Amino acid sequence: MFCVDKLFFSIRKAAFDSAFCGTAERGKERQEVAEKILSVGIDIGTSTTSLVFSSLTIEKMTGDMYMPRTEITDRSVIYRSPVYFTPLRSNVELDAEGIREIVEKEYSAAGVDPGDVETGAVIITGDTARKVNAERVLGEISRFAGDFVVAAAGPSLESILAGKGSGAQQYSVDQVETICNMDIGGGTTNTAAFYDGNCIDADCLDVGGRLIRFSRGSTRIEYVFPKIAEMGRRLGVSAELGAVLNASEITQITDAMAEAVMGKLEPSQTNEHYLFLRTEKGENRGPVKKIDVVSFSGGVGKLVYEPEEKDKLKYGDIGVYLADSLKKAIEKHSLRVVKPKETISATVIGAGSHSVDVSGGTIAVTRPELLPLKNVPILAIEDPLHLPPEEFTDQVKKKTEWLQGLDGDQTIALNLKVDKKMGFQDVVDLAERVIGATRELMAAQQLLVVILYGDYGKVLGQSLSMRLPPGKEVICIDSVDVGDGDYIDIGRPVGVADSVPVVIKTIAFNY
């Protein structure tokens, strides 16, 4: 078997070379096909719900020496809905009918028929994702609105989406600095740090403007998040349901929340408020790089950049107080702050591109009957051949937790960013690294999905298949260009070359 494999690799060497010889030619691009599609983004958050319709220009770009690729080359918002308070039936249940009415009303106001929308995303975020009927609401909305990327975003995935949508990810590329975006909404504060376009840290805190809500025209508490009530007790403030708070007591609570947010930026991670209010209690090593600059998005984050609001109870909650406390904390900690290009609608304001393509012909599918797959999130690993094995494993584990969110059974696709021509030993080494890094993942899922851009799908897939535990299957496809934050549909094999049709779904942000 070894000799056969080695012979196969020798025969394939010319294909290996040709697959990558075009990298130096990427400047010689030309546009082949361009079309406009209509997309919609629907964000159902803790405090607010909104829709945005966008026109996306999709172009197929080709070059003399590399495979065609499809890109979103232009985005323009054509309709932005008013911002609605998210309808609730109770503190633990969404008002599904009320949310659907908002969606239908805004489709009508935009003059859009659901059949006209070709792509989109419906995202439930923050404390709303914890409601008992969140998944059912997602299903109802997506059935009305179309075949979209649909997710009850877990805390870390929401952090990444907000960081991309705010423009922080692009800032890290343009300015070559490490930036931490803090998306502060009604129920959570989602933090994501980026360097050179890569998300290097994602986290979530139970800090938000709607975690204490007051009866109309008063400071009598009509809702308090349990953890905030407990924090009040620790501060000597009675923040129980029905209690009446004065301005000083509210400020004590929001000052502690703001200090928790600042604690995220401390490498030592010893801030007691941060440790208490952190949403997920697993291991957190703090930022892997020193944070150069901070940006704020979300409903409360937006207020950080605005003049002081005189009406502290303008929204019937602690949001204005929290913004004031954040401003004081920023000054106290001498933070360097920039304003992102998008604040209030950072999490999702456009929706995805359905970029239909086919894989390469050199792929491995050990059980074709497992296809098609739909809405599989992408986990990207940069330069996997040179990562220390323990770091490879850590990245897979961390990013799997980000992507699976509330759905621990969600299949993940591993995208390996290999920037070199690979020989036989390289493929063997990569297969062994992947098997070692995905042991925990493969204990929970039957299928290992691997995606490459270079022409190595079959040989890597065969190498992986030989090393997988009994009963586990592999799909390894190539000639597909994807990254973190994308989703992929993989169809059944077609054609004499046994390629598979793929649909890449990218949550497209406008900033």
Image (cartoon, grey):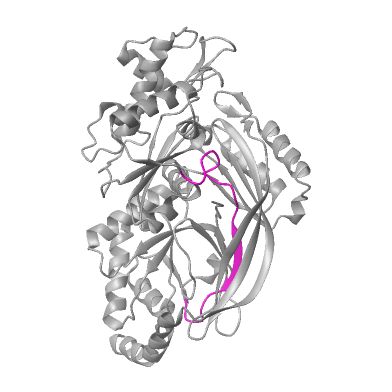
Q: Quadrant of residue 470?
A: bottom left
For this rendering, which residue is in front, 496 or 69? Answer: 69
Does residue 209 appear left or right of residue 217 in this picture? left
Q: Residue at x 67, y 42 (%)?
A: 140
Q: Residue at x 58, y 85 (%)?
A: 496
Query: Magenta: predominant secondary structure element?
Result: loop
345 falls in the magenta region: yes
Place of residue 180 in the rendered image (x, y in percent of width and height, measured from the top left): 36, 44
Q: Position of residue 458 (x, y in %)?
A: 43, 79
Q: Out of 371 and 376, give the one closest to the viewer.
A: 376
Vertically, is 432 above or below 191? below
Residue 204, magenta (yes or no)? no
Q: Quadrant of residue 14?
A: bottom left
Q: Nearer the viewer, residue 77 or 241?
A: 77
Q: Position of residue 457 (x, y in %)?
A: 43, 76
Whether residue 492 appears in this view of the structure is: no
